[in-house]
Image (cartoon, grey):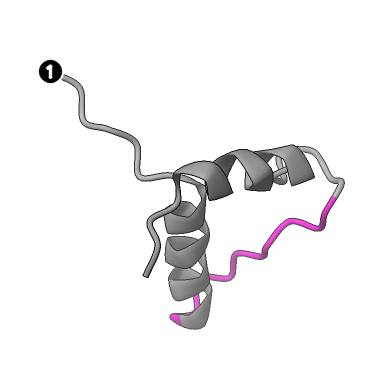
Amino acid sequence: MKKPKKGLYYNIMKKRERIAAGSGERMRKPGTAGAPTAQAFKDAAKTAKKR
């Protein structure tokens, strides 16, 4: 049985935590290869949990 994926917003939150802890990583600039697209954010918003 596979675990469900955590999602786009979860991954962004975790990366920000690693950066704050001093990992040396950087967030990708919009439009660069591998960066989430505007469509990815629209799709993720449809399934995001409301808080």
Q: Residue furthest right?
A: 31
Instruction: Give the residues in magenta.
Output: 21-30
Image point 66% across, 44% down: which residue?
42
Q: Nearer the viewer, residue 40 or 34?
A: 40
Q: Position of residue 13 (x, y in %)?
A: 47, 66
Q: Position of residue 25 (x, y in %)?
A: 60, 64
Which residue is identified by label 1? 1
Image quarter where the C terminus lies is: bottom left
Q: Position of residue 5 (x, y in %)?
A: 34, 36
Query: Compared to 26, does 38 lie above or below?
Result: above
Query: Compared to 3, does 7 lie above or below?
Result: below
Q: Nearer the viewer, residue 26 or 6?
A: 6
Q: Nearer the viewer, residue 50 or 32?
A: 50
Query: Compared to 48, does 5 lie above or below?
Result: above
Image point 40% across, 62% down: which residue?
50
Image point 21% across, 30% down: which residue?
3
Image point 51% across, 48% down: which residue?
8
Q: Secondary structure at mark 1?
A: loop
Residue 13 relative to residue 38: left or right: left
Q: State the image quarter where residue 7 is shown.
A: top left
Image quarter where the N terminus lies is: top left
Main SS of the magenta part reads loop
- Residue 24 magenta-drawn? yes
Q: Residues within 10 Å of mark 1 (few under 14, many from 20)?
A: few
Q: Position of residue 21 (x, y in %)?
A: 43, 80
Tag 1: amino acid: Met
